[in-house]
Amino acid sequence: MSKKSLDYDQINENVKKAQYAVRGELYLRASELQKEGKKIIFTNVGNPHALGQKPLTFPRQVVALCQAPFLLDDPNVGLLFPADAIAKAKLYLSYTSGGLGAYSDSRGLPGIRKEVAEFIERRDGYPSDPELIYLTDGASKGVMQILQTVIRGPGDGILVPVPQYPLYSAAISLYGGSLVPYFLEETANWGLDIHNLRQSVAEARFKGITVRAMVIINPGNPTGQCLSVDNLQQILRFCHQESLVLLGDEVYQQNVYQDARPFISSRKVLFDMGGAISKELELISFHTVSKGFLGECGQRGGYFEMTNIPPQTVDEIYKVASISLSPNVPGQIFMGTMVSPPKPGDISYEQFLRESKGILESLRKRAHMMTDGFNSCKNVVCNFTEGAMYSFPQIKLPPKAIEAAKSAGKVPDVFYCLKLLEATGISTVPGSGFGQKEGVFHLRTTILPAEEDMPAIMESFKKFNDGFMEQYEDQRGYSRM
């Protein structure tokens, strides 16, 4: 019988190479255990509502009215919905060509893109052009579209921070490019050393790879660090000198849990620098409704903004976006409510402020609870989660545990995380899924479980971990930085 096109050995090799650890072996095993009746705490993915975060009232009211516009004709609508939500829904419906069921422009609704541009100008202090803002089905789709545009073949490399979010390694593999890692320094709170960047580029070029772009994730995923202005200036100068496009993944910009290093966008730092670099450096920035205090992961709303990108290239990006016809329109409406929320004096303002501040204040407490909890455990070291939604503790595995993992045919941190899952129901992601230095092991967990549940979760983790260490302990030393 002749080979079929979708026989496994006949499909695109790049599809096989693309790996996504966040939904990998641990997640699949957790799903099996859940079907068997075991209670599972899914901390493997930054999915706030799945772990109990309540949706903000105002965005849901606006989208509800847009989804069911006949409610606007009901004489009693004002008894159920506040006037500012009614007004916002009418405004957004006026942006569409037939409600939420109609395609929008392939770049997104012009009215929403204008609101995004106004948000960016308020944030950075510099005007933004709505024509250079594309709304997307979550930030991930935008990242993938830009990587597809940049990568021409296996000889093209993308600088990616390690540990990294597996979207980047998977997409680079899918589009046939080469990932060029630059390691963040754990002992310096996951800081970036510009000398390591230069070394990574030199090594890639020695292998015949043309480095084309650099990715930064700020605040960091999975590492949780916030980049300083000085660090961002170094990165921007480096990209300018090396003629790299900078891809600024800034989806966690609302998720900051300390005051020493508030979020500042790459775009603002670039324009503050002035001179030739501010007019020449190519920058693409990404944001989403999935994180922050909205946490609307399932709505799939995102955008990217292009800075200093040649007009002909912008036209080609528009052409490729047009193949998909339209980003989902409800996700665009959520984006509108994120960048243009209720203002002081609006009927819904006080409730919006109370809800959003409550979420961020609780996340700040949970970041401290989780970091402190990990650092109380035997052979576990964890930097504080300055931002984003994750802790990334280092697990110093005893040699006997590493040997047991090898005997079981598992990577050591996968072995540890599987044991943790079986014993506690806590579903995490092994650090090997994000990249890490040889002989060093981590896991990633979100800080999203409910604040009231966090003590019990950390107690369960500590009981498992300390028992695991005792079981495999010997006197020959441990994996370490």
Image (spheres, rainbow, N blue to C red):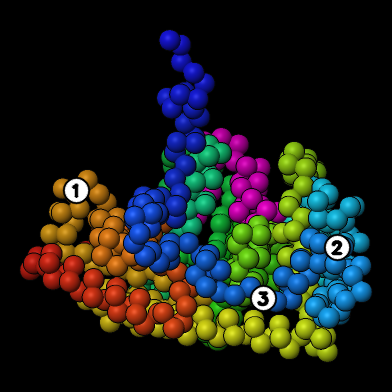
Residue wearing tag 1: 408
Q: In whole angstroms, how far apart are the C-alphas of marks 1 and 2?
A: 58 Å
Looking at the figure, which quarter contains the C terminus?
Answer: bottom left
Looking at the figure, which quarter contains the N terminus?
Answer: top left
Q: In whole angstroms, how far apart are the C-alphas of marks 3 and 1?
A: 46 Å
Q: In whole angstroms, how far apart are the C-alphas of marks 2 and 3?
A: 20 Å
Residue wearing tag 2: 69
Q: Amino acid at mark 1?
A: Ala
Residue stretch rendered in magenta on the structure: 136-160
Chain-order first, disc 3 or disc 1: 3
Chain-order first, disc 1 or disc 2: 2
Residue wearing tag 3: 56
Q: Amino acid at mark 3?
A: Leu
Q: In the image, what residue occupies the spot 26% across and 76% down? A: 462
Using residue 324 as the reference point, say whether residue 379 is left or right of it.
left
Q: In the image, what residue occupies the spot 52% across and 66% down? A: 50
Q: Assess disc 1: are there few (<14), some (14-19) or many (≥20) residues with their C-alpha within 10 Å of its C-alpha.
A: few
Find residue 176 and report its horizontal and vertical position in percent: 53, 37
Q: Nearer the viewer, mark 3 or mark 1?
A: 3
Residue 245 against residue 54 in the figure, above or below: above
Q: Nearer the viewer, mark 2 or mark 3?
A: 2
Q: In the image, what residue occupies the spot 82% across and 48% down? A: 103
Does the magenta run of residues contain 135? no
Q: Amino acid at mark 2?
A: Pro
Using residue 228 as the reference point, say whether residue 270 is left or right of it.
right
Chain-order first, disc 2 or disc 3: 3
Find residue 251 and report its horizontal and vertical position in percent: 61, 65
Find residue 74 and report its horizontal and vertical position in percent: 89, 70
- As drawn, the residue found furthest toward the left would be 475
